[in-house]
Amino acid sequence: MTKPARPAPLPGLRVDKRHFNALDLSRLVASFAVLFWHYQHFFVPPVGYGFHVDREVLTPFYHPLRWLFDYGHVAVEYFWAVSGFVFAHVYLADSTAHRRFWIARVARLWPLHLLTLVLVAGLQGLYTHINGTAFIYHEQDWKHFLLSIPLAHYWGWQHNQSFNGPSWSLSTEILAYAAFWVLLPALRRAPLMVALPVAVVVLRLFFLGWPDEPVLTCIGYFFLGTSIYGAALRGWLTLPVLVAASVACVAAGWIAATRYHGEDATILAGTFAVFFATLAIDLADRGERLAIGRKLGDASYGIYLWHFPLQVALVLVIDATLGSRAIASQPAFLLFFLALAVAAGFASHRWIERPAQKAVLRLAGRWRAAA
């Protein structure tokens, strides 16, 4: 029995380019940047919040890789912007998107999220039993665990990051997904004219200091990514325009950093400088020479969610066997950790994420058929 053919894309809502390989590859690079930012966790002893790590003294390769160690966290904003663009590319032209959107999100995100959540809960329980306090993320209670299950643990009800801490960005992104799903009919009518005002208003509220700033930032970056896709649909994003936009963002970021000392504005400008440059590379890659980027980008989600459980496990082993974490200052250990996290990301995608995703979609199909 053959599967029914998927309906043809809605006209005028998908750009001619089928895959954005450089954009996919950039997701792997962004997840790699987060590893450098969180590497400092290895040097945090069993204490509460507020411990300062002297990265310049303790981390190997600090000076040549200073930007990654000090600013690797800004890759999260880049993830959000890319998500907005990719969601527009995937869902605007899909007439079945509104119906299948959430089951596709559940199948893609939740299996690995729930697995790493339970694993971190166990590892943190062991670490707390040994040291009397949790490792890095100290909100290890039933409230935060139950909020984490539906990825609602960073919607404003939390005391701080908890359990698999990096998943906080997924929690905020769920709300961006919800806004995208609600606005999907309007986005199809006028992608740019709907997405851009949403992004501008939400980011304006963020810069004004409204509560729940991470949620506002996420939604703002996400819909800026969506609005850029809307501009692409109008044929505005030619190679010269993308290069000029990237250079303009670099200049804006430099002015924001040096004249106004505005960190948030600098991150915003820098994020989209990289974003426009990556799109320019994709546009220039007419021969699909970067097709490998599709497969490499698939590992980014696993790298992002696995690296903290790996850190907790490694710290437990180091504390039990060596009694000192000085080994983390060795270049070989940094390379080992990076390689382990990347290997975990690729293995996770192949043997955990894809099979689980197919199983969830298969189960959902059976439920739909029964209904």
Image (cartoon, rainbow, N blue to C red):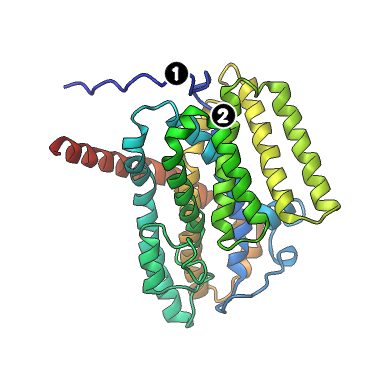
Q: Secondary structure at mark 2?
A: helix
Q: Secondary structure at mark 1?
A: loop
Q: Residue furthest right?
A: 259
> Which residue is more in the foreground, 216 or 245?
216
| Quadrant in which the C terminus appears | top left
> Which residue is more in the foreground, 289 or 2?
2
| Quadrant in which the N terminus appears | top left
Residue hosting label 2: 230
Residue located 42% across and 42% down the image: 182
> Which numbered disc, 1 or 2, marks the residue that appears first in the sequence?
1
Image location of residue 175, percent across then percent down: 46, 51
> Which residue is more in the foreground, 324 or 344?
344
**Category of crowding for the residue at label 2, using alpha-carbon neighbours closer than 10 angstroms: few (below 14), some (14–19), many (at least 20):** many
Residue located 47% across and 70% down the image: 316
Image location of residue 32, percent across then percent down: 58, 48
Q: Is residue 3 visible?
A: yes
Q: Is residue 225 visible?
A: no
Residue located 44% across and 18% down the image: 11
Q: Are marks 1 and 2 in contact (CB under 8 Å)?
A: no
Q: Which mark is residue 11?
A: 1
Residue type marked 2: Gly
Direction from residue 87 to residue 98 in the image, left or right = left
Image location of residue 18, percent across then percent down: 49, 22
Instruction: Indicate the quadrant where residue 213 lies.
Output: bottom right
Q: Which mark is residue 227?
A: none
Q: CA distance from mark 1 to mark 2?
A: 14 Å
